[in-house]
Amino acid sequence: MTEHAIELNSVWYSPTGDNHTLKDIDLKIKRGASVALIGPSGSGKTTLFKIISRLLKPCSGSVSVRSSHGELEKHKMGYIPQQLGLVRSLTALENALIGAHARIGFAGTLFGLFPKKEVDLAMKYLSMVGIAHKAGKRVHTLSGGERQRVAIARALMQEPEIILADEFVSNLDIVTAREIMDMVKNLKGKDTTLIIATHDIELARNYSETTVIMKGGVKIGEICSEELDRNKVRDVFT
Ligand SMILES: Nc1ncnc2c1ncn2[C@@H]1O[C@H](COP(=O)(O)OP(=O)(O)OP(=O)(O)O)[C@@H](O)[C@H]1O
Ligand SMILES: [Mg+2]
């Protein structure tokens, strides 16, 4: 049994077939680890998330995402996209229930046929992220921070083994961002692998063990997050 949940070998990706937005990426992430992915805008963080979550296929190289039993099913990856991807016209509860689609089936989520067990579970997660009181509110009426919480509840409904959180607190004030990050850290099981993409060095240092540094589609470094400081990565962001 491999202890690596994620292993990428020499991954290249190009959206257009010529300019590569990921170049020769090697990455190994242990099961249960917390990893930050930092790099300036356009450095390839979101693309890397999409490769890991199998939304995109690499042009070359290999990608392996595994549970302790074998290849990890796609629905066991809780992807919290940069744009959250909530359905604005649905309620917070209905959005959370979308996370259970692998158990309920898409027809179930589409027609609102939710087993009581799943509704109870969704309410439990909404309550854990502090938004149960807004369960019946449509998402377009919620604030940014409230929406982030709904997106986390939806990811938790997947009972994920890997959580991929793409700059999902970057639009929040620093207090709310920390509160939400603390929550995710506490909810993370010991075998759950957490990867956060961020521009924020403080956030990477406080919420991850290892930081992977990206620039121009290249992985330019991997360091212990405790050693991260502004001087070390100044070059990366200029
Ligand atoms: N569909 C696409 N077609 C062409 N180019 C794309 C496409 N998607 C992304 N790119 C390019 O790929 C590069 C990497 O983009 P990506 O979204 O992965 O960066 P990022 O590190 O997540 O940036 P940010 O911090 O702004 O979210 C960028 O130069 C972007 O313009
Ligand atoms: Mg991005």
Image: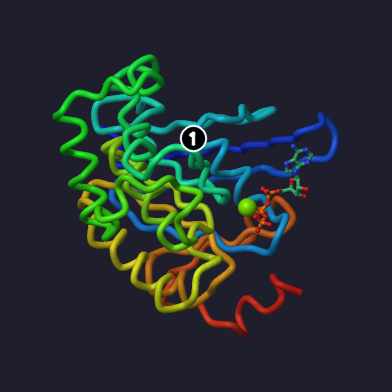
User: Could you tell me which quadrant the N terminus lies in?
Assistant: top left
Q: Left or right: 118 with respect to 96? A: left
The residue located at (49%, 75%) in the rendering is 173
Judge from the rendering whether residue 171 lies leftward or rightward of residue 24; answer left or right.
left
Image spot of residue 28 (x, y percent)? 45, 46
**Residue 4 visible here:** no
Residue 119 in the image: state x and y as whole percent.
21, 34
Residue 209 coordinates in the image, percent (x, y)? 37, 65
**How many marks do you count on the picture?**
1
Residue 90 drawn above or below residue 192:
above
Q: Nearer the viewer, residue 10 or 145?
A: 145
Q: Provide the residue designation for mark 1.
A: 53
Considering every residue shown, the one lying at the far top of the view is 107
Instruction: Determine the image quadrant of residue 20.
Output: top right
Q: Camera-side residue: 54 or 184?
A: 184
Q: Is residue 3 above or below residue 177?
A: above
> Dot 1: within a 10 Å radius of its alpha carbon, few (fewer than 14), some, or many (20 or more) residues?
many
Tell me if residue 238 can be seen: yes
In which quadrant of the rendered image does the C terminus lie?
bottom right
Residue beneath the point at 47% across and 61% down: 143
How was this image coloured?
A: rainbow
Answer with the quarter of the image where residue 67 lies.
Answer: top left
Front residue of 117 and 137? 137
Q: Type of residue at label 1?
A: Ser
Q: How far from the left and from the top, in percent, is residue 210?
A: 42, 63
At x 48%, y 63%, the residue is: 169
User: In the rendered image of this protein, does residue 58 appear above or below residue 214?
Assistant: above
Residue 235 appears left or right of 225: right
Tell me which residue sits at (20%, 31%) in the image: 118
Judged left or right of residue 134, residue 41 is right
- Helix, strand or loop at mark 1: loop
